[in-house]
């Protein structure tokens, strides 16, 4: 639980460094490992120490010399067990990896079967699966080999102890130091001791594994959330009006990486619309991600109303911003629950209204089960445009003061996109809208348009102003008008 809570607070940057699979493995596996190993480790150790201690005491009373001989193979036993269990563990881990490779491969092949067939890759894919399967088989045998080797090894060492006891005991008995009865006692003690000693070796290897898992968990728990409320946070701020300004904002993803944004400035009043255009990689997403503070500027500041965004409580800020990302993420759940994701208590009417605003209502009414239709693998497959409009409805439902659309209608046709945006502007009154798009038509009616190139604002103004400037914007406009005409002809 501590781990999960902590994971929720970490910034997206953390998730770029560790893959999701990695985090999940750590979260579930490592906790499990720690739990599995610590309990038994304590139990085994206590038991082993008690039994071995009692046996050794009893043996010492009879003959210190013979005790020494009898105990000689014991460390070997513990060490042997230690390495053996490490080997088994290592091999079973490799086996797990191989297994997950194999299942991933098969899963991908099945879900991508259309692509596979379209590119006639069935045969080569079959070969790849064969190779993986063989690897899995081989590793399984390997593990079985080690697993079956330890039992004879164990018996040999026990036998060795007994032989030593009888051999040296016999000589001592001839010398008259011990009796034959003592020797029999010793053989018994040695036999009692072997298991506890062996388990000590096992315990040490378990503790080692537990410690490794613990170490990995510690590394995650020690990662400080990079974006969080600090002592700069002004807790008196309870709502956001929607004025937005960037002041000399620059950004780098890494300390010595390139400037992805370079001295970006703009000012927007609550209720206005900002359009951002630019080629792929020009920094549009990076720019808008700073508004809900998914990223913080490296230099400069983002102002919301009269506050540096970093002074607004994160909860208030995120509540006030509706961010629709470039790639849509929908859960395997009903359409309604996907829309209600950010506002679980919303009424059916509100959900319907949000769907209407996102131009999704007609579509949903067309589904057999309407809003209760299941999305994803077990249900209906939504088109790219429908997914995007679902994500938009999700953001609209929360009535955010600042709405950010990061090329989030790219899969929707131009006409529909324009209709949605126009409706949002007229019904959104005093709400601020930031529209990122690769289409001029989407930003055409914005109060202010920024043209980004390699992280810098190279042109700015309204549509009409930019068209006459004859720069990048005008060129893009020309290009897209032509495309539209061609489309209309086709
Ligand atoms: N997490 C990241 N780490 C390092 N570089 C990144 C990261 N995300 C984006 N970039 C780089 O930043 C630049 C701007 O990316 P982005 O903001 O996504 O542009 P756009 O949205 O305009 O396509 C690109 O060169 C991209 O490669
Ligand atoms: Mg982008």
Image (tube, rainbow, N blue to C red):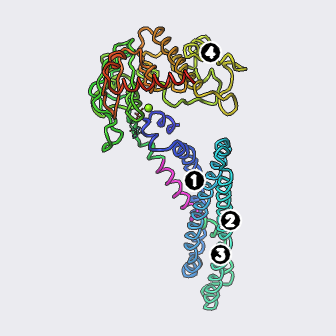
**Which mark is nearer the camera, 2 or 1?**
2
**Label at residue 158:** 3
**Which mark is nearer the camera, 3 or 1?**
1
Which of disc 2 and disc 4 is earlier in sequence? 2
Q: Nearer the viewer, residue 321 or 10?
A: 321
Determine whether the beta carbon of the residue marked 1 sits less than 8 angstroms from the nearest atom of ligand 1: no
Residue in the image at 55% along x and 70% along y: 79
Q: Report how far apart the C-alphas of labels 3 and 2 lie in the structure.
A: 27 Å
Crowd band around label 4 with a 10 angstrom C-alpha radius: few (<14), some (14–19), many (20+): many
Residue in the image at 66% along x and 48% along y: 120
**Which mark is nearer the camera, 1 or 4?**
4
Which of disc 3 and disc 4 is earlier in sequence? 3
**Label at residue 37:** 1
Q: Report how far apart the C-alphas of labels 3 and 1 lie in the structure.
A: 26 Å
Assign the magenta stretch its main secondary structure: helix
Q: Report how far apart the C-alphas of labels 1 and 4 lie in the structure.
A: 54 Å
Crowd band around label 1 with a 10 angstrom C-alpha radius: few (<14), some (14–19), many (20+): some
Residue that mark 4 sits on = 361
């Amino acid at each position: 639980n501590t781990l999960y809570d902590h994971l929720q607070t970490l910034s997206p940057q953390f998730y770029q460094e560790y893959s999701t699979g990695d985090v999940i493995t750590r979260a579930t596996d490592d906790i499990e490992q720690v739990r599995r190993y610590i309990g038994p480790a304590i139990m085994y150790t206590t038991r082993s120490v008690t039994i071995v201690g009692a046996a050794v005491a009893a043996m010492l009373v009879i003959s210190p010399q013979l005790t020494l001989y009898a105990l000689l193979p014991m460390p070997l036993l513990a060490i042997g067990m230690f390495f053996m269990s490490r080997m088994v563990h290592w091999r079973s881990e490799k086996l797990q990896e191989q297994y997950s490779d194999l299942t991933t491969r098969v899963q991908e092949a099945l879900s991508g079967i259309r692509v596979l067939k379209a590119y006639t890759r069935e045969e080569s894919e079959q070969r790849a699966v064969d190779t993986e399967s063989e690897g899995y088989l081989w590793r399984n045998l390997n593990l079985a080999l080690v697993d079956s080797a330890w039992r004879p090894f164990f018996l040999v060492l026990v036998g060795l102890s007994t032989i030593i006891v009888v051999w040296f005991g016999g000589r001592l008995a001839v010398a008259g130091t011990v009796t034959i009865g003592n020797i029999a006692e010793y053989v018994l003690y040695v036999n009692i001791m072997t298991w506890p000693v062996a388990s000590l070796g096992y315990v040490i290897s378990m503790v080692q594994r537990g410690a490794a898992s613990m170490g990995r968990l510690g590394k995650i728990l020690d990662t400080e959330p990079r974006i969080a409320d600090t002592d700069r946070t002004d807790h008196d701020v309870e709502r956001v009006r929607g004025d937005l300004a960037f002041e000399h904002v620059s950004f780098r993803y890494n300390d010595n990486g390139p400037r992805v944004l370079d001295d970006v400035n703009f000012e927007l009043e609550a209720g206005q619309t900002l359009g951002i255009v630019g080629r792929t990689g020009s920094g549009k997403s990076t720019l808008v991600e700073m508004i809900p503070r998914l990223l913080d500027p490296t230099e400069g500041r983002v102002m919301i109303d009269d506050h540096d965004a970093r002074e607004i409580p994160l909860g208030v800020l995120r509540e006030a911003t509706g961010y629709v990302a470039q790639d849509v993420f929908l859960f395997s759940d009903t359409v309604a629950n996907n829309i209600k994701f950010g506002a679980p208590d919303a009424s059916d009417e509100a959900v319907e209204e949000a769907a209407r605003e996102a131009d999704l209502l007609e579509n949903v009414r067309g589904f057999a089960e309407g809003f209760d239709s299941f999305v994803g693998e077990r249900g209906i497959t939504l088109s790219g445009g429908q997914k995007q409009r679902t994500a938009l409805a999700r953001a609209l439902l929360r009535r955010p003061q600042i709405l950010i659309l990061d090329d989030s209608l790219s899969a929707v046709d131009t006409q529909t996109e324009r209709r949605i945006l126009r409706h949002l502007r007229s019904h959104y009154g005093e709400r601020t809208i930031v529209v990122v798009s690769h289409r001029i038509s989407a930003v055409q009616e914005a109060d202010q348009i920024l043209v980004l190139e390699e992280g810098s604002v190279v042109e700015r103004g309204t549509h009409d102003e930019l068209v006459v400037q004859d720069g990048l914007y005008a060129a893009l406009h020309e290009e897209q008008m032509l495309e539209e005409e061609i489309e209309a002809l086709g």
